[in-house]
Image (cartoon, rainbow, N blue to C red):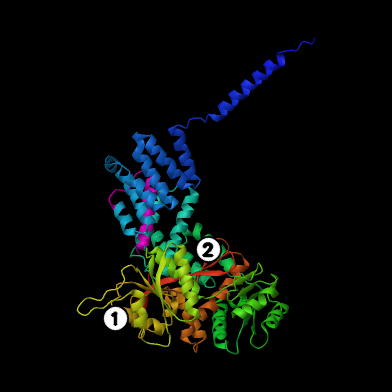
Amino acid sequence: MAVISRRPRRWFFTILAISLIAAACSLVKPVETPVDKEARARTLASQGNHADAARAYAELATEAPADHDNYELLSAEEWVAAGNVAAAKQALAAVSAEARTKSAASLALVAAEIALAENDGVGAIRELDSIPVPTAADLAQNYWYIRGMSSFLTGHPLEGTRAFIERERYLTDANALRASREELFNKIRSAAERGVSLKPPAKSDPVLAGWLQLGPVAVELQRDPMHAPAALENWRRLYPQHPANQSVLALAQSQIAVATEFPDQIALLLPLSGRAEAVGVAVRDGFIAGYLEQQPSARPRLRIYDVAAESVAAAYQAAVQDGAGFVVGPLTKEDVAAIAPLSAGRTPVLALNFLSDSITAPRTFYQFALLPEDEARIVARRLVADGKLKGVAILPAGEWGTRVGAAFADELTQLGGSVLDSGRYDTGRADFSDVIKQTLQIHAVKGEPTTHRGDAAFVFVAGTPSAERLIVSQLKFHYVGDVPVYSTSDSFEPDPSANSDLDGLFFPDMPWMVSADPVTGRIRDAVRDAWPARAARRDRLYAFGFDAYRLVPALRSNSLSGSNQIAGVTGKLRLDDHNRIRRELDWAQMKNGVPVGL
């Protein structure tokens, strides 16, 4: 009879026991102490995970009563950085009454950050005025940053510039210092673009005066880089020791080089005869005006082809065979669709219209257009930003009105708003009372005040300038003047004597039409000098041609990729994921027949 050893079985239980103990240990997570949690929150904040950092600080606020208020303030600050203002306010409200006295400075700084995040510059400055400048470097630099940003926001660039200069005393990191100067440069440029006075006070120190006088130079760099080198050199002669020389202007020099690097030869394909001749000629003249801005020695060869005189395909093939390094055009939707399959990505193309969404374009086939649908979407975004989520639309009958109305409603709905009602009007009529009364539910009873629906925060009106003037004036006649009216740029033509009926109207338009900055004014004058017989009603087409020329080097160098953009005379231009140029426009309100920038 065999004897069976028991040893292997004992080893089995020993190994099993060890495995179970190890497994049990692995299931027990180490306890995270408050010190660990605070370190984790700081790490999350430094990595840009501000929402997670805010939650971590909120947990600490509940678990560490002794430091509750400090952690709530830190949570509020991180929520601001995360873009969640509502959560930031909630965290700030949780701070105890006792801490509001003991930690008044920290509380005011966080409250000012919240106000700034809500674009309430006045409120932010009021919070800062309630406390002295902090002595701690990190708090002091934040104090001056908020004051600087708020001052620019409220239209006081002098105070804003002084605040940014003061902030530099507390910035020891070279990267932070460079970023602060770039922020200041951008703010000064934006102020100059809006036409805000940047004249230095008498006896200003050179640093302050130099920053302020960079405003026009900054606009030149963005809007007309062909003339920027001369403006930049003139500024350098005046301020050779200015801190901007070692930071932002070194970057500006490289941007100028990219913005003026053209191919040896450009082909321009446009209809210069036939039914689209007038539009094609206006775009051509604007393109040539941009071309003439460049120094003669640096200009590329330019060859222009009339696509109406031969087929657009033949014109395109001829342009490529003639040695074009870049093709601009054609203009009509049909012609753009015809050359898209021909290009095959060999020679870059900037088409002056959009392909339909069903057509896939080659990688180097770019598209640029002035579409009313895009403007309708811009209006919708502005309304949501202004907190006006619900309203009505009054649109012309026909295909144009349908497209504009659909784009507006789609964008508004996606952003959380809604069109309560939409009325269509006959463009051949002059009395729009019926559509106004129906859309706005106007009730008039003899002897009683006229009433209209109270749930409409806006009226969106689209149409020609003549129709807009009639509709806006008739809205006032029917006592709807208390509801703000928004429109696209089609409502406006530069005729102050005819536009007084549009007073109060809000609308977006290209800088060429509404900007008060001197650079845009000089470009407009240059076009008028070059083409004195131009038709003023086609001004937007001249601007369109001018920017088409400017886009060529930007597209060749891929400098419009990602979040980069250029400040053109048709708007701020960026490239989307479908190789389409998208525009952001300037906002204006009509006052006394003249658009006033907002």
Q: Which quadrant of the figure has residue 515?
A: bottom left
Residue, disc 1: 477
Question: Which residue does the image show at 53% across and 70% down from the upper left?
Answer: 225
Q: Left or right of 448: which side holds 476?
A: right
Amino acid type, callout 2: Ala
Determine which of the numbered discs, if any, sits on residue 252 in the image.
2
Residue 473 x/y as whole percent? 33, 81
Residue in the foreground of this view, choosing between 559 and 189: 559
The residue furthest front is 1
Q: Secondary structure at mark 1?
A: helix
The quarter of the image holding the C terminus is bottom left
Q: In the picture shown, does residue 197 fall above or below 143? A: below
* Region of the chain picked out in magenta, as a range: 128-156
Q: Nearer the viewer, mark 2 or mark 1?
A: 1
Q: Is residue 139 visible?
A: yes
Q: In the picture shown, does residue 38 fall above or below 279? A: above
Whether residue 57 appears in magenta in the rendering, the answer is no
Residue 467 x/y as whole percent? 40, 83
The residue furthest right is 1
Q: In the picture shown, does residue 541 fall above or below 164? A: below
Whether residue 149 appears in magenta in the rendering, the answer is yes
**Secondary structure mainly formed by the magenta segment:** helix
The quarter of the image holding the N terminus is top right
> Could you give the CA–CA distance between mark 2 and mark 1, rounded to whole angstroms?
52 Å
Determine which of the numbered discs, if any, sits on residue 124 in the image.
none
Residue 270 x/y as whole percent? 61, 83
Specify few, some or many for label 2: CA neighbours under 10 Å numbering under 14, 14-19, or 20 or more. Answer: some
